[in-house]
Image (tube, rainbow, N blue to C red):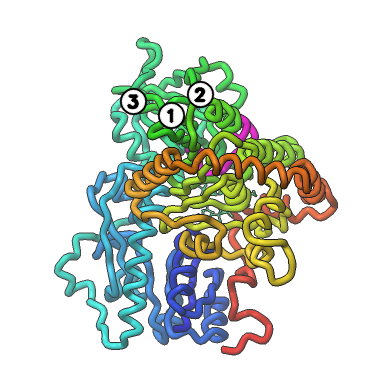
């Protein structure tokens, strides 16, 4: 079928749906919902049999829904209506939530229902629920709805006839609904409120007496700070986060956004004043027992080491890259035979930290520092001779994060993960992380018609299955998060115990030595950085402009041509 995806942005759900529908043989084109006239033009050009709207912020115009079946993906259970569906569900502590695929009609979210799915609602950030449980449920519901539509004889159920409609119409959640009362609310309530507002719009609050939005909260069970401290007092800092007293405990605030500013690590958003707080570092890299904020955590089992790095949004600033490299170098000295880089729950890595770069006095210098720190980390991985290294992607990876993963010996991705192994979307950035060494080594020389070039040029997201099929990764593992962790641990233990491990490590070291003799890593790095220097300091400002729009979330004014296939010159509808 010819399916138009009408969406506010090419977000992770839209990427997943595009890939899944294409894999089922459908012809897909994408249009951003910029204006009614633009959407109408897209429909006229593409002549879709079906329109799917995975992520919309406004209603589809009647001129379209009255003539075409438009399926809306609503992040709520059957009967739920309104623009803050997930926010209310999380804030109200629902035990189960869902997704409904319904047909667009005059009344928002009230059209007949084509498919639905439910999932247990984890106590987690809204953005995490969206990228994991919701995206998984939405994908299966949309695929079911598309099949039903294709069958031609399915009649969607009007909402009034749904016997299992538990939801109701709820208003937009306003900041007044999110307010935290630090004197009266307990830690669980505050956590829920901050979770319900993550990553947008955050909870309007104040830090150091200054109004700001707060994000990214973590419970603290170990450190409670000074007993004389009052609820709401700031107690300590650790890396990017601030510890704040609550009525019955304490919690960490990882990110904050001051008025007119960017969302930044909290200690950077309030750099001068937070320096006066006592530092509460962790002693070492071992995972702490009990709840605390620990962005880098190491554990061991079955002859394998597992390094977790829970960096918000997968963005890796210079200092985070440096700390992760230190942790990696330390882990390499442990008596382990396999070293698994686990990344975080929602993202494995999205490369250099564009917000921190944007906020720097010299974004060009900070870009340079950040890419060099990423490269040092990548080299530390490439030069690991005593262990088999694995990147286990439980969450998505993008740009430099994908090539950092490829710097390991084996890349395993959880089914449902999306990879964007290309840099060009960020203002034609050339990219580094030794990709010019890693990609051809894996997929063949970079030349016309080669897989390596295709990956970089097409700028298309890859599902975990597709990434394994094209050999960018080595395996696609279980889709369930818990099953994935178990599978990763089992496979790592198997490699560690395999009789051929010693021979495998010898072969690995020999290959590295041969590669180094043929062309040193330093030469790859110099060549890549020569391009990056032009991106950062050259007269073409594309990267700086693209980064500015990305971090400021400027609304798109047109759909990128590589997504809007119906706008290709010579496209025949
Ligand atoms: N630096 C800082 N923030 C980043 C980031 C980065 N490298 N990559 C993603 N983010 C942030 C987004 O701004 C967004 O922030 P929010 O929580 O305030 O909304 C959040 O992470 C999620 O990103 P989003 O784009 O909504 O997620 P997605 O899953 O739909 O898309 C990507 C994933 C990777 C395609 C997209 O985020 C992207 O293109 N990132 C930039 C990658 C890049 O160019 N890195 C630099 C070169 S190495």
Q: In the image, 530: left or right of 274? A: right
Q: Which residue lies furthest to the right in this view?
A: 539
Looking at marks 2 and 3 on the same chain, the residue that comes earlier in the sequence is marked by 2
Going 43% across and 76% down the picture, which residue do you hit?
A: 24
Q: How many labels does the image show?
A: 3
Q: Mark 3 points at which residue?
A: 290
* Region in magenta: 310-322
Mark 3 surroundings within 10 Å by alpha-carbon count, few (fewer than 14), some (14 through 19), many (20 or more): few
Q: Mark 1 points at which residue?
A: 293
Q: Which of marks 3 and 1 is in front?
A: 3
Quarter occupied by the N terminus: bottom left
- In the image, is residue 452 above or below residue 230? below
Asked where in the image residue 231 lies, by quadrant, the reply is top left
Residue 461 position, x and y percent, is: 55, 62
Quarter occupied by the C terminus: bottom right
Q: Which of marks 2 and 3 is in front?
A: 3
Mark 2 surroundings within 10 Å by alpha-carbon count, few (fewer than 14), some (14 through 19), many (20 or more): many
Magenta span main SS: helix
- Based on the picture, tell me whether residue 304 belongs to the magenta stretch: no
Q: In the image, 446: left or right of 246? A: right
Viewer-nearest residue: 59 or 506: 506
Q: Mark 2 points at which residue?
A: 238
Residue 260 position, x and y percent, is: 59, 42
Label 2, secondary structure: give it.
strand
The reply to whether the residue tagged 2 has its Cβ within 8 angstroms of ligand 1 is no
CA separation in Å, label 3 and label 1: 10 Å
Q: Are marks 2 and 1 in contact (CB under 8 Å)?
A: yes
CA separation in Å, label 2 and label 1: 8 Å
- In the image, is residue 498 above or below residue 293? below
Going 73% across and 35% down the picture, which residue do you hit?
A: 361
Viewer-nearest residue: 199 or 328: 328
């Amino acid at each position: 079928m010819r399916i138009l995806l009408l969406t506010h942005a090419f977000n992770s759900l839209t990427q997943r749906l595009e890939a899944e529908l294409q894999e089922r043989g459908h012809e897909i084109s994408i249009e951003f919902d910029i204006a009614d006239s633009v959407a109408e033009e897209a429909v006229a050009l593409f002549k879709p049999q079906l329109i799917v709207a995975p992520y919309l912020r406004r209603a589809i115009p009647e001129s379209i829904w009255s003539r075409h079946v438009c399926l809306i993906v609503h992040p709520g259970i059957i009967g739920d209506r309104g623009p803050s569906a997930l926010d209310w569900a999380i804030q109200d502590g629902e035990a189960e939530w869902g997704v409904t695929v319904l047909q667009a009609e005059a009344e928002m979210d009230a059209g007949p229902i084509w498919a639905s799915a439910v999932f247990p609602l984890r106590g987690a950030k809204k953005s995490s629920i969206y990228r994991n449980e919701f995206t998984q449920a939405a994908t299966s519901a949309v695929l079911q709805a598309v099949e039903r539509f294709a069958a031609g004889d399915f009649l969607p159920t009007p909402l009034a006839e749904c016997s299992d409609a538990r939801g109701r119409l709820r208003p937009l959640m306003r900041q007044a609904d999110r307010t935290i009362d630090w004197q009266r609310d307990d830690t669980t309530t505050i956590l829920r409120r901050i979770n319900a507002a993550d990553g947008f719009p955050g909870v309007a609050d104040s830090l150091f007496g200054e109004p700001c939005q707060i994000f990214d909260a973590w419970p603290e069970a170990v450190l409670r700070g000074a007993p004389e401290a009052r609820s709401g007092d700031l107690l300590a800092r650790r890396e990017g986060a601030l510890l704040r007293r609550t009525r019955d405990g304490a919690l960490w605030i990882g990110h904050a956004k001051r008025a007119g500013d960017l969302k930044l690590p909290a200690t950077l958003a309030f750099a001068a004043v937070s320096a006066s707080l006592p530092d509460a570092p962790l002693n070492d890299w071992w995972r702490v027992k009990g709840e605390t904020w620990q962005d880098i955590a190491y554990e061991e089992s079955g002859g394998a080491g597992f390094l977790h790095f829970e960096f918000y949004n997968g963005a890796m600033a210079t200092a985070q890259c440096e700390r992760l490299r230190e942790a990696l170098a330390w882990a390499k000295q442990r008596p382990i035979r396999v070293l698994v880089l686990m990344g975080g729950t929602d993202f494995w890595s999205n490369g250099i930290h564009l917000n921190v770069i944007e906020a720097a006095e010299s974004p060009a210098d900070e870009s340079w520092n950040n890419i060099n720190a990423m490269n040092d980390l990548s080299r530390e991985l490439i030069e690991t001779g005593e262990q088999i290294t694995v990147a286990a992607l439980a969450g998505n990876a993008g740009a430099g994060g994908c090539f950092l993963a490829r710097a390991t010996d084996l890349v395993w991705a959880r089914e449902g993960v999306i990879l964007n192994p290309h840099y060009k979307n960020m203002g034609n950035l050339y990219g580094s992380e030794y990709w010019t060494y890693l990609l051809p080594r894996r997929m063949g020389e970079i030349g016309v018609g080669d897989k390596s070039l295709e990956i970089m040029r097409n700028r298309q997201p890859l599902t975990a299955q597709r990434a394994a099929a094209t050999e960018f990764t080595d395996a696609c593992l279980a889709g369930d998060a818990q099953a994935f962790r178990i599978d990763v641990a089992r496979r790592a233990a198997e490699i560690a115990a395999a009789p051929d491990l010693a021979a495998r490590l010898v072969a690995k070291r020999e290959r590295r030595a041969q590669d180094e003799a043929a062309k040193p890593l330093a030469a790859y790095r110099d060549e890549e950085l020569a391009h990056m220097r032009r991106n950062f300091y050259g007269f073409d400002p594309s990267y700086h402009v693209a980064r500015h729009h990305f971090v400021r979330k400027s609304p798109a004014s047109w759909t990128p041509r590589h997504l809007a296939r119906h706008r290709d010159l010579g496209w025949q509808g």
